[in-house]
Image (cartoon, rainbow, N blue to C red):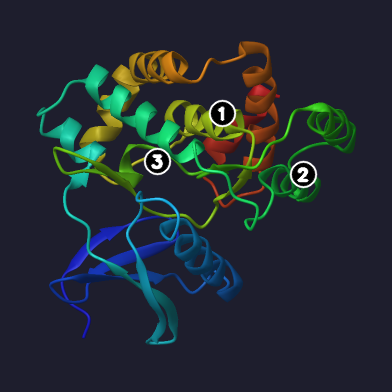
Amino acid sequence: MIGKFIARGRTAEVYRWSDNYVLKLFYDFIPYDAVLKEYNNTLSICGNANICPSPIEMIKYEDRDGIIYENIKGISLTSVLLNRSLGVKKIADLLAKTQVRIHENSCDNLDSVKDAIERSISKSNRITEEKKSELLKMLHKMPDDNRLLHMDFHPDNVFYDNSNTFVIDWMTSGKGNPLADVARTIIILRYSAVPFQNPVFRIFIRIFKEKLIRDYLKSYAEVNPIDIKQLDKWIKVVAAARTNERLPEGEIKKLLKIL
């Protein structure tokens, strides 16, 4: 039986299901295929990497699709930062090192992130055909890989229990070049109009977001060196792909300025 409300995101609400499980209940505008993709992706990822809560089963609840997940310990890095139990630099370091852990995994059975970016750019009605052609030519020349990518990686999706980190929300995950994932994290941190649930953190992130991004990139590059020119290209194509999502108009305008 559904229990206490826990959190609300852009695609779903989370409720306690029992002492050991939670229910991620998707909004009715999220297609069944997207929910199934998250379930299958997370099942595959959890079987190979100790980095995410295990999915138990898919269910229907009041005509909405849901996934029952293992209830993980700890709190989000957003909450850790709000509680001031760790500073910005430590949060940035945890964020970067957790993402490196993700990228250390290879995966051939997930969809190509590069292909998904291409589809989203092609479908976007906010970009001119001339600009689309330019961006797609750039994308086709960019390096690809079979590394595991999350593609919605930010502090609200990373949970910390004082000894380890776990990552939730794998709907957009796939395989590809790690810089695509890094680029999307930067875009979410820097440009999202409503990047996190907590309104206090929204104010905090406006003030400290550039320090968080700078420290995050520095920590990531200490383990995985970053080609800045390639990262800039990924930021452009990932921003273009994001214009095809359900986002506030203010955020869309910021993304279009990048292009």
Q: Amino acid at mark 1?
A: Ala
Give amino acid for label 3: Val
Q: Residues within 10 Å of mark 3 (few under 14, many from 20)?
A: some
Which residue lies at the image location 47% right of the left edge and 56% below the top edge? 45
**First in residue order: circle 2 vs circle 1:** 2
Q: Mark 1: few, some, or many residues within 10 Å (few <14, many ≥20)?
A: many
Looking at the rendering, which quadrant does residue 205 occupy?
top left
User: Of residues 132 and 125, which is closer to you in this image?
Assistant: 132
Secondary element under disc 2, as helix, strand or loop, is helix
Label 3, secondary structure: give it: loop
* Residue that mark 1 sits on: 183
* Quadrant in which the N terminus is drawn: bottom left
The image quadrant where one finds the C terminus is top right
Q: Earlier in the sequence, mark 3 or mark 1?
A: 1
Q: CA distance from mark 3 to mark 1?
A: 18 Å
**Mark 2 residue type:** Glu
Query: Height in image: 222 above or below 192?
Result: above
Q: Residue at x 34, y 20 (%)?
A: 212
Left-right relation of 69 to 2: right
Which label sits on residue 194?
A: 3
Callout in the foreground (3, 2): 2
- Residue located 27% across and 28% down the image: 203
Numbered label attached to residue 118: 2
The answer to whether the residues at label 3 and label 1 have Cβ atoms under 8 Å apart is no
